[in-house]
């Protein structure tokens, strides 16, 4: 399939809108939620439990913490920081690449696509090789590998978006040339514009006349006559979907439902059907080259080092011509997120050192089942705290620094009743990337069905997770790869009517699977 054919197919898109995260203290919906007290109870209970843990440790060992874990993850910290700085700096190559594509020096389809994937593969392999050469513990290896994946996804989205827009620009120029040729046979460009404006005026007068006549007949008969229309026609389906997305906070729409950034070309109203069709197609292509935000950023004016630097600060793995922005940086908000980050990390450290690391080397007489039970609750608490640090504290902190207004980094994944719902909600940045650049891309490029595209997306995600575990544990076991693929039949089972009606049962399965999955993976990778 050619890029031109791809451009004609509706593709999944990601829409950014100003919104607050669920746990933001300024979020009115969360502050009025009837379960908000349990959030407070969770932190108070965890604080009391931590103080109790410190007291018992002082009584037993003479210190609240032994800091062995701290000495491990602080090892070679300077080299890790320099390595991460080199990684982030290397992404700046995206800007000259995009400039070369925009000026026609590199043909994006398909030379640019190949170069892009070769570069990203090289960066990933270089980071993995470096972690093995440094012989870092699992914390340092895991951090650099995960950050490498994040940088590669950012690079891919930036390059792919600008490459696609270059192709759209070429198509737009070609359609404009065809439009000029078509108008030459009806008296020229200016004559065609005049005819189109005249027809537009005639259509508007006719519409006003029909409206006036309908109102007159209705008043004379004493009844109100409604025009015959389906539910799809009143009002416009696209506007309804857009309003629904704004109300629900949904970020998934189709490209033909996206708000357009430019007005339609005047020739769309020309009486000649060929000229009208060409003008309509030209208007659609032009709308893709202009952002829908207040700045009306037009490609390729966005390809600057400053624009890329701001994009790197924004906690999004999907690139846009223009993101929704806030008016100012709130110092108190940054202070709150900073304190929350360090406070939560202290809780996370305490749980890991006291209740997880000792059980990763159990005594020979301790059974497999007992080890799973001992690790299940600590791992669940660790998961919740890591989620809070990354998506509520760090993402919101960087969003505040970069004036990024869309704080929808997660949804209410804790209420999920199926694995596909969980995967959509718990990590929105990665979900948005996979939605646009994997799921939708495979459908449009390879004409895969939605179910096959979902399988490809799960395979790629599972392979990435397994690669991270291979780097961290220095083992290739495929445990997490297989566990992720098991989610596919579980998604199909969750769609059965009996299970869909019983939301409590579906939600309980999610939580029990999380409780069992984390310690199971830990024991499997450590001992087997």
Image (cartoon, grey):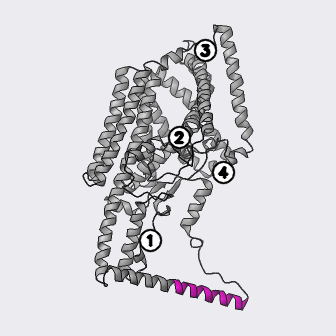
Disc 2 or 1, which lies upstream in sequence? Answer: 1
Above/below status of 376 relative to 254: above
Residues at marks 4 and 2, CA–CA distance in whole angstroms: 43 Å
Disc 4 or 2, which lies upstream in sequence? Answer: 2
Q: Is residue 227 something one can see in this rendering?
A: yes
Disc 3 or 2, which lies upstream in sequence? Answer: 3
Residue 25: horizontal and vertical position, in percent?
67, 41
Residues at marks 4 and 3, CA–CA distance in whole angstroms: 48 Å
Q: Residue at x 43, y 79 (%)?
A: 269
Quadrant in the picture for residue 61: top right
Q: Is residue 357 left or right of residue 48?
A: left
Q: In this view, does 347 lie to the left or right of 5?
A: right
Residue annotated with mark 1? 264
Q: Is residue 65 left or right of residue 257?
A: right
Residues at marks 2 and 1, CA–CA distance in whole angstroms: 36 Å
Q: Residues within 10 Å of mark 3 (few under 14, many from 20)?
A: some
Q: Is residue 474 something one can see in this rendering?
A: no
Disc 1 or 4, which lies upstream in sequence? Answer: 1
Q: In this view, does 118 lie to the left or right of 285?
A: left
Give the residues drawn in magenta, as a range: 204-229
Residue annotated with mark 3? 65
Residue annotated with mark 2? 401
Q: Which residue is drawn at 57% across and 85% down?
A: 208
Above/below status of 235 relative to 321: below
Residue 87: horizontal and vertical position, in percent?
38, 33
Above/below status of 217 relative to 475: below
Q: In the image, which is nearer the foreground, mark 4 or mark 2?
A: 2
């Amino acid at each position: 399939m050619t890029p031109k054919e791809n451009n004609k197919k509706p593709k999944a898109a990601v829409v950014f809108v100003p919104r607050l995260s669920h746990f933001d203290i300024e979020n009115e919906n969360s502050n009025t939620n009837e379960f908000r007290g349990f959030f407070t109870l969770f932190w108070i209970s965890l604080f009391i439990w931590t103080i109790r843990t410190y007291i018992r440790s002082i009584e037993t060992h003479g210190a609240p913490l032994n800091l062995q874990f701290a000495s491990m993850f602080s090892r070679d910290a300077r080299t890790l920081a320099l390595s991460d700085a080199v990684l982030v700096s290397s992404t700046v190559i995206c800007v000259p690449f995009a400039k070369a594509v925009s000026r026609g020096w590199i043909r994006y389809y398909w030379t640019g696509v190949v170069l892009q994937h070769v570069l990203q593969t090289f960066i990933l392999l270089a980071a993995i090789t470096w972690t093995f050469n440094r012989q870092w513990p699992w914390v340092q290896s895991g951090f650099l590998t995960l950050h490498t994946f994040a940088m590669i996804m950012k690079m891919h989205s930036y390059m792919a978006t600008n490459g696609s827009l270059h192709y759209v620009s070429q198509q737009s120029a070609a359609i404009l040339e065809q439009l000029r040729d078509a108008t030459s046979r009806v008296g020229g460009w200016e004559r065609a514009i005049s005819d189109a404006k005249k027809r537009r005026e005639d259509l508007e007068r006719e519409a006003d006349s029909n409206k006036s006549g309908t109102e007159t007949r209705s008043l004379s008969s004493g009844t109100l006559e409604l025009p015959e229309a389906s539910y799809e026609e009143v009002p416009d389906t696209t506007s309804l979907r857009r309003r629904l997305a704004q109300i629900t906070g949904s970020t998934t729409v189709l490209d033909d439902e996206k708000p357009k950034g430019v007005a339609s070309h005047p020739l769309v109203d020309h009486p000649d059907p060929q000229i009208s069709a060409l003008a309509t197609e030209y208007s659609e292509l032009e709308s893709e080259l202009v952002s829908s935000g207040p700045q009306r950023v037009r490609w390729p004016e966005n390809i600057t080092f400053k624009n890329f630097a701001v994009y790197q600060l924004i906690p999004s793995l999907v690139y846009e011509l223009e993101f929704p922005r806030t008016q100012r940086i709130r110092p108190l908000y940054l202070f709150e997120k900073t304190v929350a980050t360090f406070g939560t990390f202290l809780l996370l450290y305490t749980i890991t050192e006291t209740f997880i690391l000792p059980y990763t080397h159990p005594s020979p007489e301790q059974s497999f089942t007992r080890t799973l039970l001992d690790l299940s609750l600590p791992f669940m608490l660790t998961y919740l705290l890591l989620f809070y640090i990354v998506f509520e504290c760090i993402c919101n902190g960087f969003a505040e620094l970069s004036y990024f207004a869309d704080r929808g980094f997660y949804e209410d994944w804790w209420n999920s009743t199926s694995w596909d719902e969980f995967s959509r909600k718990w990590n929105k940045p990665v979900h948005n990337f996979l939605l646009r650049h994997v799921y939708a891309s495979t459908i449009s490029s390879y004409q895969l069905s939605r179910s096959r595209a979902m399988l490809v997306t799960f395979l790629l995600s599972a392979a990435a997770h397994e690669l991270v575990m291979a780097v961290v544990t220095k083992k290739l076991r495929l445990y997490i790869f297989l566990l992720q693929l098991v989610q596919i039949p579980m998604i199909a089972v969750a769609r059965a009517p009996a299970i869909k009606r019983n939301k409590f049962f579906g939600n309980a399965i999610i939580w029990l699977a999380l409780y069992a999955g984390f310690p199971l993976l830990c024991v499997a990778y450590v001992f087997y």
